[in-house]
Image (spheres, rainbow, N blue to C red):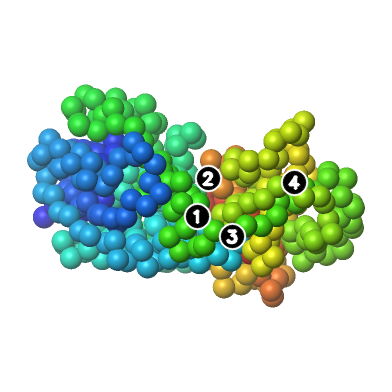
Amino acid sequence: MKERVVIGLSGGVDSSVAAYLLKEQGYDVVGLFMRNWHDTTGTLAGDCPWYDDQMFAELVVKRLDIPFHYVDLSGEYRKRVVDYMFSEYERGRTPNPDVLCNREIKFDVFLKEALKLGADRVATGHYCRREEVEVNGKTMYRLLAGSDPNKDQSYFLCQLSQEQLRYAMFPIGGMLKPEVRRIAEEQKLATAKRKDSQGICFVGKVDLPVFLQQKLKAKKGDIMEIPADWSGYRAEKHDLAELAQPFAYSGDDGVKAGEHNGAHFYTIGQRKGLNVGGRPEPLFVIATDVERNVIYVGQGAEHPGLYRRALHIRPDEIHWIRPDMEMAVGEQRDFSIRIRYRQPLQKGTLRREADGMYVVFEQPQRGVTAGQFAAWYDGDELMGSGVIDA
């Protein structure tokens, strides 16, 4: 009997080609489309709504002659991803909804729906790879970077567990994007020339302040400009905890440069949306204070307030994809690290302490942002990740 693989069809070219490859490899392939979002609040004009995605997914399954199913997971998506987003922004943190979507929806709720359809495995169109290794007589699953360095999406899967990876298949993970497009055109798939989706997973491209104002109220506050020679940048750091702390600005630091509509609408490194001109160099957000409703800015992309050497992850936010490689308290190990999607891997050291994990970089990093995920790699294997606490 053929092994049944349920593939998440998004209406994009990647999952379409993944479905084609699985069928060619002799699997019993079933397409499953999930609708996760209904609201169009803040959605930018011209962004494809969900029904376009479903239409393209249906055209693909007809072309491939495979069964098609539809499931509405919008309730779980709002509860597990969007509500989390709102609560994080309210706290002055910047979440990554795509990472949450993969952990909570695609490889949890969606996986359960696929199992109801008799799935042995679940496939997606992610650019990453999965391998099995034997460790002390037990099968462990490795999550590897995609072969296309320009499209590697392993970072978005940095919170997956061994149990989730047990079911996972990534049919295009060893391919380059142009090759995927070529196959789609050769097979006359409707998605062959369709643009890749952008923006928040399943929501699309949004005007973030408008989107967030569904739950978070606009509130006038000060924009304070901090000079590059601020004394705090020269203060000596004596231990890991101090090194991992973000710079702390007070009401007496800097000069008022303008006003904003709510500190929780801004994130570290942001340049657009400040509406403050008349400076030799553009202004960037270097810190936000949601308690006092103040955002701090600095001139130029090289402003010292944008750079930090270390970050901290709380003990309950440390996640190991490979639990057999977990570090003990007091242990230190070198890894390659990234703190955002598409960032080139950075050399650094992880140090496990009783109060969590400290990540110290070889070179200062731009835009370390609380709420985002730091992911660490050994070669091309993603070993673990954690939510940046500070």
Q: Nearer the viewer, mark 1 or mark 4?
A: 4
Identified at 59% across, 54% down, the residue is: 261
Q: In screen coordinates, is 389 left or right of 239?
A: left
Q: Nearer the viewer, mark 2 or mark 1?
A: 1
Residue 55 image point, x, y percent: 18, 41
* SS type, badge 2: loop
Q: Which residue is mark 3?
A: 219
- What amino acid type should be assigned to the residue bearing mark 3? Lys
Q: Which residue is mark 4?
A: 257
Is there CB contact under 8 Å for labels 4 and 2?
no
Identified at 74% across, 37% down, the residue is: 300
Q: Which residue is mark 1?
A: 96
Q: Earlier in the sequence, mark 4 or mark 3?
A: 3
Q: Quadrant of the N terminus?
A: bottom left
Q: Using the numbered discs, state the Cα–Cα distance from disc 4 to disc 3 in whole angstroms.
A: 17 Å
Q: Nearer the viewer, mark 4 or mark 2?
A: 4
- What amino acid type should be assigned to the residue bearing mark 1? Asn
Q: Which residue is mark 2?
A: 341
Q: Residues within 10 Å of mark 1 (few under 14, many from 20)?
A: many
Look at the image and tell me whether residue 116 can be seen: yes
Residue 220 image point, x, y percent: 62, 57
Q: Quadrant of the C terminus?
A: bottom right
* SS type, badge 3: loop
Is there CB contact under 8 Å for labels 2 and 1?
yes
Q: Using the numbered discs, state the Cα–Cα distance from disc 1 to disc 3 in whole angstroms.
A: 24 Å
Q: Nearer the viewer, residue 251 or 50?
A: 251
